[in-house]
Image: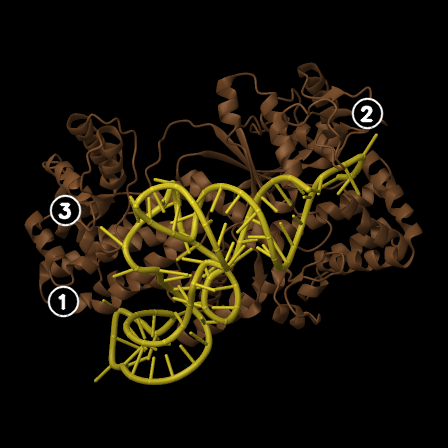
Amino acid sequence: MASSLSAEIKQRVIGIVQDQYQIELNDFAAEIPPRTELGDLAFPVAFELAKRIKAATGEKKNPREIAAKLAEGLSNIPGVAKVEIAGAGYLNIFFDRAQMFGQLVNSERLADSKQPTDKIIVEHTSINPNKAAHIGHVRNSVLGDTVVRILKATGDTVETHNYIDNTGVQVADVVVGFIHLEKKSLDEIKAIAEREVTSRADSFDYYCWDLYAQVGQWYEEDKSRLEVRAKTLHEIEAGNNATAEIGEYISSKIVDCHLDTMSRLDISYDLLARESEILHLHFWAHAFEKLKASGVIVFENEGRNKGCWVMKAEGEAAEGDVESEHDADKIIVRSNGTVTYTGKDIAYHLWKLGKLGLDFHYRPLRHDHRGHEVWITTGNEAEAATTKTAFGNGTAFLNVIDVGQSYPQANVKKAVMLLAASEEERAKVSRSAHLAYEKVTLSADAAKELGVDAEGAVSMSGRKGLGVKADDLMDRLDANALQEVQARHAELSLAEQQKIAHQIAIAALRYFLLKYTRTSIIAFDFKEALSFDGETGPYIQYSAVRANNIFRKLGRKPEEVQSDFASISAEQVNAFFASESGNDLWSLVYFAARLNDVARLSADAFEPTHVAKYAFQLAKQFNVFYHDHHILSEADESRKTLLLMVADIARRKLELALSLLGIEVPEKM
RNA sequence: GCGCCCGUAGCUCAGUUGGAUAGAGCGUUUGGCUACGAACCAAAAGGUCGCACGUUCGAGUCGUGCCGGGCGCACCA
C-alpha cells in the first residue's frame, strides 16, 4: 500500500514539474527517512531539479524553494496527511496513520496475483550421491529452498528439482572403495546399508564418507590406481553390468540419506532428475542436432580447435589476433567425438525449458515429511508410472550452484538463449540465472575441533574427509535446544519438548546460513552456529512467541480483538499515534508494513538475506515495543485495543517473514 | 594476461536504484526480572568505510589506477 501511494505521488510530481518548469522527468528516487519524525517517504528530487533548471535556463534555484513548489501541488492526496520540506530540500511525506493502520489490521497474506504464471524451475541441493551431506551442501539447499518459498509467495509458479549425478567420478570412487579396497560384493554392501543403525556413525552415508576419504588416500599412494577409477567410471556410464549395479545401489541409498537429512530442515523437492537417464535416453544426441541445425555450435576445420564443435565467444574475434593462452571459444564436442560436460548440461537445460523434444520417464519415489510426493526419473519405461504429472517445460531456470561454476553456467545460459525462438521467449528465458553462492569454510577453531591445526580458515574437503556433517550439526542443535526447552518448560511432555527443540534447531541453522549475502564466504564456527541468542533464528521466533503469548494470556484470539477495533474512530487512532510514544509505535507498524516490498526485492535479486535481515530487525523492534508497553495492564480500553492491534500486525508479519525463511513459530519457548 | 567476488568497529557481517548523524550481532564495561517468562531490554566504549585521484549539490555506494585476499579462464566433471 505504501508503494502504490509512492507511485501516485511520483506521478503528481512529474506532472507539476512538467507544468512549472517544462522539464520531462521520468522516474526519481524515493526513500524512507532515517527517522519517523521526518516522515514516511522522502523525495530528494528537488536537488536534481535545481541542477536541471540551471542547465536549461541558467537560473539558479534553491532546492528548498523547488520542494516548496512541489509540496503545494501535493495537497489532497488520499492517504497523505502532511507534506514537509526538510533539510536542504527534501520533500517529506507523512501518511495518514489511521487509514494505513486500518488497512493493515484487516490485511491478509502477501498479495499474490492468482493468475497463471510462467514456471520457473529451481534446481538446488544436487549433492554427489556418494557420501554424507556437509554444511556447505546445506547452504546450497537452504538458499535454494528459501528462494523457492519467496518466489512462490510473490506469485511465481515454481518446480523444484534436485539433480542426481549418479554416474559421475565421485560415485565411481566409492564403488572403487567397496570393490577394490574392501573387496565387498553387492550383497555385503547391502548388508551394511540396511543394517540396524544404533548410532549416527553407523549410517550408510557416514560409512561412505570415510570410505571416500580412504579411496582418495589409496590413489595418492599409487597414481596408477587412477586407471581403476577410469575403468569403473566407464562401466557405470555404460550401464547393464555388475559394477553399474553396485553404483546404482549405492547412489540410490545415499540419495535416501540426503532426502532424510533435508527433511530435517523442512526441505523437499518435486523431482529428482538423474544423470543416468540423461545418458541412456540420449538427451545429448537430440540436443546436438538442434545445436548444429541452429548454428549455435560450429565445426572447426582449422586452428587449435580443429575437429571440435565449438560455441563461439561473443564478439567475433578479429582475424589475425594473436591467440591468447586461453581461447574464448567453448568446446562442446571434442575432436574424438565425445561431448563435454557443458554440452550435456546444455541438453539437460533444453529439456528443462521443454525445447529438447525428449522426455524422461518418471516414477514416484517417496512421500516427504509433509506428505508431498517426490518423483524421480527412470530410464525404464516399464516401471514408469502411467499417470505422471508434467515435469519440465519451464519458461526459465534457476540453478543454485557454487560460484566456482560461473563460467560453465554462463555458457549454458548463452546456448539456451541462442536457441530461443522469439523475442518474447528470449525475454522469458532471460530470467534464468545461475544463483551463485560462496563456499562455507571452517574457522580456525572449527578446524581445530575436527582435528586440524590451522592459522586461518580451512576449506572443507570431502576428499580428505574434512567437514562438518549436516546431521551431526543438527543433532547438536537438537540436543542443545532440548536442554533449553526442558529448563523452561518442564511441564510439557518429552514429545512436545522435542518438537519445539527441533523447530528451534531448524531456525538456528537456517538463519545462520541466510544471514550472510550469497557472495560472502562463511567461515563456519561452532559457537556461532550453535547460538540461540542475538542475531539468530531463535531470537526471531522468540519475539513471535511473545506476541502470541499476549493473546493467549488475554484469552482472546486476535480476530476477536479486531472486531473491537472496528468501533474505534480514526481520530482516536491518530491521537494514539500522536501520543508521547506515538512515533515509536508508528515506526514499528510502518516497518511491519514493509514486508511485501522486502519480499519483492528479495525475489528479484534471488537474495534471501534481505528477508532474513528484515525479519531480525522486525523482531528487534517488536521486542522493544514489548518491553516498553505492558499491554495487558493498560487501563485505557481503547488504547489497549490499539496496542493489541499493533502487536497483532507485528505478529502476523513476523510469522509470515519466518515462513518465507522456512522457519516455524513454536507454541512456547 | 583476461574475467568474477571480497576488503566497513577488536571479531563476524549488513548497508535496496548515489541522499539526511555509516548500522547490527558477538565480545568488553555497566544497569534492569514477584513474569504479556530475561532465548529479552537499556547504556557506554569501539570507524582515515583498503589507498589515491576523479564524477556530483551530495560517494561506503559510480569511474580510473594501485594494494591485499579468494576463485575462475581444460579436447576434466
User: CB under 8 Å between callouts 2 and 3?
Assistant: no
Cα distance between the residues tagged 1 and 2: 84 Å
- For label 3, the SS is strand
| Residue in front for this viewpoint, A35 or A344 | A35
Q: Amino acid at mark 1?
A: Glu
Comes first in the chain, label 1 or label 2: 2
Q: Which residue is mark 2?
A: A303
Chain A, colour shown: brown
Comes first in the chain, label 3 or label 1: 3
Classify residue A221 as left or right of residue A37: right
How many residues crowd mark 1 within 10 Å: few (<14), some (14–19), many (20+)? few
- Tell me residue A36's x, y (percent): 21, 55
Question: Callout 1: residue from which chain?
Answer: A
Q: Amino acid at mark 3?
A: Glu
> Does residue A530 appear in the picture of this structure?
no
Cα distance between the residues tagged 3 and 1: 34 Å
Classify residue A140 as left or right of residue A514: right
- For label 2, the SS is loop
